[in-house]
Image (tube, rainbow, N blue to C red):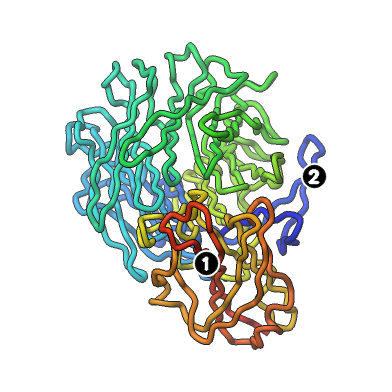
């Protein structure tokens, strides 16, 4: 599901438990949807070492999983049905060998998944690799193995990975182009089913020991690369922003914390969504708390990046390592604190949720495991997509010591409908792929997103259909149909994909606000004549008259499928 920042228009239908932090700030703790455990989980797998979520699909990396008589690693795919999470697949590499640590990093976008194996030896000991998997129906298959064109022993290519549509970025933090462990990152693009290296990214001021590529994130034509050891501890670390023009990637900015200090490791984690970047600094000393950690938000204005906010967490403590993992999705951010202690145990872990309303960020929720125990390291990895959050706990021991697990949380609007038919998988009319979970990109460079909130109860008739990423002031039409067009993949229509069809009903035109958001309110069920047992697919058509990517002057959001209940 996707998140909408429609705070003034949508009353969140959340099963929340009220908690209070030590600083007396009132927070909400979202209800835990499920604990995700691998079907064959065993001692030492460290499942949840890495996590990623896109729409209704979550992936857990288990780099120490035992396969075919060797510790090769694995990745587990789970899917959300609207009511429950189930394991859909266990993925392993076609050519995996002992000690590859496949699953060290994972990133999923729609039906495509990238998994890092940073200790693979194809190009020399610990040169590293990454694997691409694609889903057809419910079946996953390996599409490609990615390696650097100039791979060398010790590069650790695959320590970090990120994917957005048909673009993947892979970090190689121990590459030596500009001195030992200066680091690099590689961009790969897909054409059909073929992946090719498009660029090698390095910092304009690269130097030995930077570990550039320790973290990477990509969204559309923007990539961010973390360099947490920039200047060998003389500075707190940095992150670099690159943008694509045609097939060329150019460094647009260098991000530095305005209060950084040596050893902060700013850039240990990064995440980019649209015009916003989130950077973790897990060893920041927040006086008097050493290694408390923090995370920083930067916003883009033209080609400039400006620090907007610093996240610490209302319950922050010494050695919490806040910001060890970060994830950003539109107006929601999740920041880990995996070394956080609860009242009874050490290093149980936690994660903080921050939300943006207009130009302001505020802490909105605090996540912990319902069955937390000492040294679980809940929050070692985090990922958010819309209102769906996944938090890894690689040292959880339900299935054996350090078997690992992950936890799923709904941060708001996860229960009314299921999103489908995204424009982030290379199927858009003129290559105008949107971001993860969005429709095809419009003139803003991002895609429109639709999500259902409220409930699917016909008697309550409180279903809301909201959309964001539309064009402010331009007409937007909500329509519904009985069928998911082309088996849910949609067909080309204007600058987007038409996903809903069959006995189409139009539910009215709205004019999005200045942020490009609109909400169709209560009464949709009565107006549509829907009854319990009906299944309807909803979608928003909208005008895009200036700068339309494909020249058709209109576009569509993703689709939303709703199963109506009494």
> Taking 131 as reference, is 278 left or right?
right
State whether residue 564 is above or below residue 241: below
Residue at 17%, 38% in the rendered image:
122
Q: Nearer the viewer, residue 345 or 63?
A: 63
Residue at 52%, 49% in the rendered image:
444
State whether residue 448 is above or below residue 311: below
> Taking 501 as reference, is 140 left or right?
left
Alpha carbons under labels 2 and 1: distance apart: 32 Å
In front of the other: label 2 or label 1? Answer: 1
Residue at 46%, 71% in the rendered image:
498
Q: Which residue is mark 1?
A: 419
Residue 380 shows in this picture: yes
Q: Nearer the viewer, residue 242 or 233?
A: 242
Secondary element at image label 2: strand
x then y, percent, for residue 155: 27, 29
Any mark on residue 26, and which? 2
Residue at 36%, 19% in the rendered image:
206
x then y, percent, for residue 85: 51, 65
């Amino acid at each position: 599901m996707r998140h909408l920042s429609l705070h003034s228009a949508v009353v969140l239908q959340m099963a929340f438990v009220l908690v209070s932090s030590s600083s007396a700030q009132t927070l909400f703790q979202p209800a835990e949807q499920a604990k995700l455990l691998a079907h064959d989980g065993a001692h030492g797998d460290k499942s949840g070492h890495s996590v990623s979520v896109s729409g209704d699909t979550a992936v857990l990396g288990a780099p120490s999983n035992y396969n075919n008589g060797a510790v090769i690693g694995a990745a587990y795919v789970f899917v959300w049905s609207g009511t429950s999470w189930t394991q859909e697949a266990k993925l392993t590499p076609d050519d995996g060998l002992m000690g590859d640590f496949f699953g060290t990093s994972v990133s999923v976008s729609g039906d495509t998944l990238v998994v890092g194996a940073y200790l693979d030896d194809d190009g020399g000991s610990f040169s590293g690799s990454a694997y691409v998997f694609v889903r057809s129906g419910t079946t996953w298959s390996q599409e490609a193995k990615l390696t650097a064109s100039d791979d060398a022993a010790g590069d650790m290519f695959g320590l970090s990975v990120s994917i957005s549509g048909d673009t993947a970025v892979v970090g190689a933090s121990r590459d030596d182009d500009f001195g030992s462990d200066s680091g690099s990152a590689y961009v790969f693009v897909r054409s059909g089913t073929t992946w090719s290296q498009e660029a090698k990214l390095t910092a304009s001021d690269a130097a030995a020991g930077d570990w550039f590529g320790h973290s990477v994130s990509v969204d559309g034509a923007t990539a961010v690369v973390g360099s947490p050891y920039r200047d060998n501890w003389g500075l707190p670390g940095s992150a670099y922003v690159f943008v694509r023009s045609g097939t060329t990637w150019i460094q647009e900015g260098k991000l530095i914390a305005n209060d950084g200090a040596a050893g902060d490791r700013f850039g240990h984690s990064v995440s980019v969504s649209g015009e916003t970047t989130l950077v973790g600094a897990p060893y920041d000393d927040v006086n008097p708390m050493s290694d408390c950690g923090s995370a920083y938000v930067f916003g883009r204005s033209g080609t400039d990046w400006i620090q907007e906010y610093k996240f610490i967490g209302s319950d922050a403590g010494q050695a919490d390592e806040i910001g060890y993992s970060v994830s950003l999705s539109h107006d929601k951010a999740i920041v880990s604190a995996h070394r956080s202690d609860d009242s009874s145990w050490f290093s149980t872990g936690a994660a903080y949720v921050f939300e943006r309303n207009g130009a302001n960020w505020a802490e909105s929720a605090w996540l912990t495991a319902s069955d937390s125990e000492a040294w679980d390291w809940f929050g070692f990895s985090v990922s958010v997509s819309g209102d769906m959050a996944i938090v890894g706990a690689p040292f959880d021991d339900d299935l054996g010591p350090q078997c690992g697990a992950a936890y799923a949380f709904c941060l708001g609007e996860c229960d009314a409908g299921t999103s489908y038919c995204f424009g982030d998988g290379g199927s858009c009319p003129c290559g105008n792929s949107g971001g993860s979970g969005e429709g095809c990109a419009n003139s803003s460079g991002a895609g429109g997103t639709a999500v259902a909130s409220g409930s699917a109860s016909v008697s309550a008739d409180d279903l809301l259909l909201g959309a964001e990423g539309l064009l402010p002031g331009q007409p937007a039409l909500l329509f519904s149909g009985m069928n998911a067009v082309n088996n849910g993949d949609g067909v080309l229509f204007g600058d987007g994909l038409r996903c809903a069809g069959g006995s189409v009903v139009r539910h009215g035109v709205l004019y999005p606000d200045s942020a490009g958001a609109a909400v169709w309110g209560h009464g949709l069920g009565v107006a549509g004549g829907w009854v319990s047992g009906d299944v309807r697919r909803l979608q928003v058509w909208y005008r895009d008259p200036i700068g339309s990517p494909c020249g058709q002057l209109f576009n569509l959001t993703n689709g939303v499928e709703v199963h109506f209940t009494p």
